[in-house]
Image: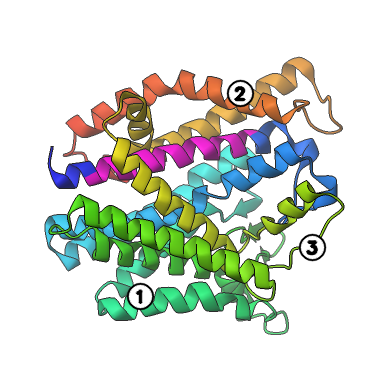
């Protein structure tokens, strides 16, 4: 197996791990809506099992986006062509935006034609890929600097609002402020994932790739540099979080040590704060190092399989969850106010485990089909 294939296997394994964690959160958003949580969460009102399940799921979007940037560099290195990479990023970015609007939004709302469109993570990844396509021709130092300035500086913009400037406000909502864009009485857009911080994260992933995934980089040196980066990111997070003055809402001393710990890790995702990015990207890099060391183990193979078909899995699992909810609602009705739901967080994990086992044969088949039919252009986007 080539060094490039080994690197891609570790990346697929990490991607597979986080999409399975993501599924826990989507099961929560399907069968635990009677205990919906805000962003950031209210510690006094949130049970610990729900809090830490949600915090674990915070890992998913930052790792997805940083791996997207990293994979873009590997694509460029494989074909040794800036123009091909730019074209691929533009096409895939536009494809993801269309997918969010036409396919994924329907899986969440069940409305067609839609009255509300939620611009969520796939939209954010698509826009970030388009932005990366426009920027990758710049010198590497400029890309590093741009990524760092966006990630460390975007929280300075939190107090800016353009409500008094209706022409510019939709652009600002797309870039940095979660809110509603209304087009008359016919359509509302919810900017669930403002894209500016995610552009910083994808640039960071591309820059990391350009540094540690060069062909001449030895596995030992690559793992060491990734380890240094991951530990450094977490260290900066801990320092800034302890100082408690910038990068997210302040944490508080609560009535119990557990609640104080929960407050410390109660980070803002929409848009992702500096501290949210530092913690989760740092953890993601440590996981990448760990998975590269064990990627030949048999238990890692399912993760690689799931991670090799991320968009196919994303679409399939959303529609499976939608159908399961409609079935449960039809059979048992609403047992928690206006919702059907389960009573315990542990049940969410059991549902996730069962669904992962059930869906695995389909993912394995599609992964093999995708590998054997590389001439089909659409498959490389899935």
* SS assignment at label 3: loop
The span from disc 2 to disc 3 (Cα, nearest Å) is 34 Å
Q: Earlier along the polypeptide chain: callout 1 or callout 3?
A: 1
| Image x and y of residue 44, in percent | 85, 49
Give the camera-side residue of 23 and 187. Answer: 23
Residue in the image at 46% along x and 57% along y: 282
Q: Is residue 318 visible?
A: yes
Residue in the image at 68% along x and 27% along y: 346
**Mark 2 neighbour class, 10 Å CA radius: few under 14, some 14 to 19, many 20 or more:** some
Mark 1 sits on what residue? 144
Mark 3 sits on what residue? 252
Q: Give the range drawn in magenta.
A: 7-27
Give the camera-side residue of 2 and 189. Answer: 2
The span from disc 1 to disc 2 (Cα, nearest Å) is 41 Å
**Is 15 contained in the magenta span?**
yes
Residue with the most extreme top position: 331
Q: Earlier along the polypeptide chain: callout 1 or callout 2?
A: 1
Q: Earlier along the polypeptide chain: callout 2 or callout 3?
A: 3
Colouring convention used in this rendered image of the protein: rainbow
| Image x and y of residue 156, in percent | 62, 80
Give the camera-side residue of 1 and 65. Answer: 1
Residue in the image at 27% along x and 40% along y: 9
Mark 2 sits on what residue? 351
What secondary structure characterizes most of the magenta part? helix
């Amino acid at each position: 197996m080539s060094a490039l294939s080994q690197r891609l296997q570790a990346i697929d394994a990490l991607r597979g791990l986080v999409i399975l964690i993501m599924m826990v959160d989507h099961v929560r958003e399907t069968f635990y809506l009677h205990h919906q949580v805000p962003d950031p969460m209210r510690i006094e009102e949130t049970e610990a099992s729900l809090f830490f399940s949600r915090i674990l799921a915070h890992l998913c979007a930052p790792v997805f986006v940083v791996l997207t940037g990293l994979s873009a560099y590997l694509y460029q290195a494989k074909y040794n062509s800036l123009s091909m990479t730019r074209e691929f990023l533009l096409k895939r970015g536009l494809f993801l935006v269309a997918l969010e609007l036409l396919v994924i939004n329907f899986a969440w709302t069940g409305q067609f034609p839609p009255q509300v469109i939620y611009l969520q993570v796939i939209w954010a990844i698509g826009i970030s890929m388009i932005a990366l396509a426009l920027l990758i021709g710049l010198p590497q130092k400029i890309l590093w600097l741009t990524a760092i300035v966006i990630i460390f500086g975007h929280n300075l913009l939190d107090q800016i609002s353009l409500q008094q400037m209706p022409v510019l406000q939709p652009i600002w909502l797309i870039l940095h402020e979660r809110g509603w864009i209304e087009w008359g009485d016919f359509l509302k857009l919810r900017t669930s994932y403002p894209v500016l911080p995610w552009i910083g994260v994808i640039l960071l992933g591309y820059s990391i790739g350009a540094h540690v995934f060069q062909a001449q980089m030895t596995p030992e040196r690559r793992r060491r540099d990734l380890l240094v980066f991951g530990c450094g990111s977490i260290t900066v997070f801990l320092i800034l979080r302890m100082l408690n003055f910038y990068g997210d809402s302040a944490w508080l001393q609560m009535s119990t040590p557990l609640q104080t710990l929960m407050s410390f890790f109660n980070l803002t995702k929409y848009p992702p704060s500096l501290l949210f990015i530092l913690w989760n990207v740092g953890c993601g890099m440590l996981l990448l190092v760990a998975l590269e060391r064990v990627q030949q183990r048999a238990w890692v193979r399912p993760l690689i399989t799931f991670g090799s078909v991320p968009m196919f899995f994303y679409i399939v699992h959303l529609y499976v969850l939608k159908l399961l909810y409609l079935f449960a609602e039809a059979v048992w009705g609403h047992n928690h106010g206006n919702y059907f739901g389960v009573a315990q967080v542990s049940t969410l994990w059991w549902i996730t485990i069962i669904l992962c086992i059930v869906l695995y044969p389909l993912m394995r088949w599609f992964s093999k089909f995708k590998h054997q039919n590389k001439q089909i252009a659409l498959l490389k986007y899935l």
